Amino acid sequence: MSDKKPLLEVNNLKVHFNIKPRQSWPWSAPATLKAVDGIKFRLYQGDILGIVGESGCGKSTLARAIIGLVQASAGEVLWLGRDLTRIDHKERRETRKDIQMIFQDPLASLNPRMTIGDIIAEPLRTFYPKMPKEEIKEKVRAMMDRVGLIPNMINRYPHEFSGGQCQRIGIARALILEPKLVICDEPVSALDVSIQAQVVNLLQELQRDMGLSLIFIAHDLSVVRHIADRVLVMYLGKPVELGESRALFEHPAHPYTRALMSAVPVPDPDYERNKQVQILQGEQPSPLKPPSGCVFRTRCPLVDDNCARIKPLLEGNDRHRVACLKVAIEQAVGECDK
Ligand SMILES: Nc1ncnc2c1ncn2[C@@H]1O[C@H](COP(=O)(O)OP(=O)(O)OP(=O)(O)O)[C@@H](O)[C@H]1O
Ligand code: SF4
Ligand SMILES: [Mg+2]
């Protein structure tokens, strides 16, 4: 059990969008798309939380709701105890010093008309308008060096850089204000496999050196396994499993997590030969018409009648929790609901 106060506490967070169906009568009511539906976790200083799940399960929407780029429909995002869903524009701007984001497509997230020096310096100029030009330049050059870019390239433009270098520019810009939390939304999925490891290692190094906390969103479970202390698995906007990385990867409990994991190669030939591959059956249902009860039931090998009637809650202990009616995780004594 930890006495530390969490940096970030997300409580029952929901982001629901009202969608007008394409083929509908003008007077018909919009449908509700529950992109994020009841997410709850805590993040402590220096921790890395991995978030995984298939495309469309709500990972980016969750990230955007935490940082305030999309309005939460319900729930809380407590940053050092303060609810970010209820703050005004000015206060939100202040929190951007502490919480930064790195996006999936490095080139698209950089302004093509700005030099990389200006791109990296932009947050400094915004938050510290009185900082002398020379000091800004010095900080930018030091940060470029820190992320593995040659400082002499400060006057070049984004299109002159490779994908991996562009992501290093994005990382430099995110870190220049020395934030406490960086949300990385699939930061390596657009990069060549050979470059992915370099960028992940860089993020890990920076996280250790600067005492950062990271939220690391990825499709690729092997990347998350490598980097995260804790992992949240999402399906159709809901949390299906949450736990310490080791507990979750060694003993995946939810049938969905098991299916995702059985597709990840492990660098152990004996394990690979003997492992039972569980292929994920069927398609992900439309988020506009999620199944009743457990949202995973239409693809679950363990499904029974109860699964259509009862919504499973995330239950277990502070190391590991699962939302399934048929798989339980032992309750720990003195649970702290981490
Ligand atoms: N602004 C919006 N308006 C309506 N629906 C949205 C909006 N943003 C996202 N959605 C829907 O919310 C769901 C979750 O989308 P989101 O982009 O968060 O998923 P994701 O897990 O990040 O997927 P990917 O792995 O492909 O990036 C999707 O069904 C998406 O179509
Ligand atoms: S609640 Fe039922 S359908 Fe859902 S994961 Fe568990 S067994 Fe499968
Ligand atoms: Mg996404």
Image (cartoon, helix red, strand yellow):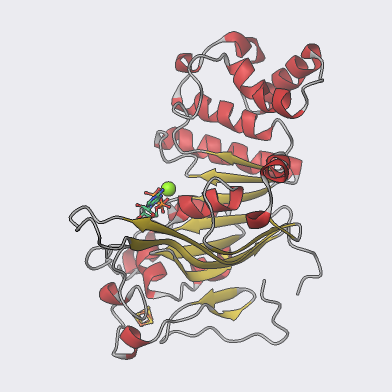
Residue plotted at (42% across, 82% down): 311
Residue for point 37% across, 61% down: 33
In-image side of 208 versus 34 (left or right): right
Residue 102 against residue 318 in the figure, above or below: above
149 and 110: which is toward the camera: 110
Is residue 51 depicted above or below 247 in this figure?
above
Number of marks in picture: 0
- Residue 270 x/y as whole percent: 38, 64
Lateral position of residue 297 relative to residue 188, left or right:
left
Task: Measuring from the top left, give residue 62's x and y in whole percent.
Answer: 51, 55
Residue beneath the point at 62% across and 59% down: 229
Give the percent coordinates (x, y) of residue 318: 64, 75
Closer to the camera, 311 or 169? Answer: 311
Quadrant in which the N terminus is drawn: bottom right
Residue shown at 56% from the left, 71% from the top: 247
Q: Position of residue 320 (x, y in %)?
A: 57, 74
Quarter of the picture holding the C terminus: bottom right
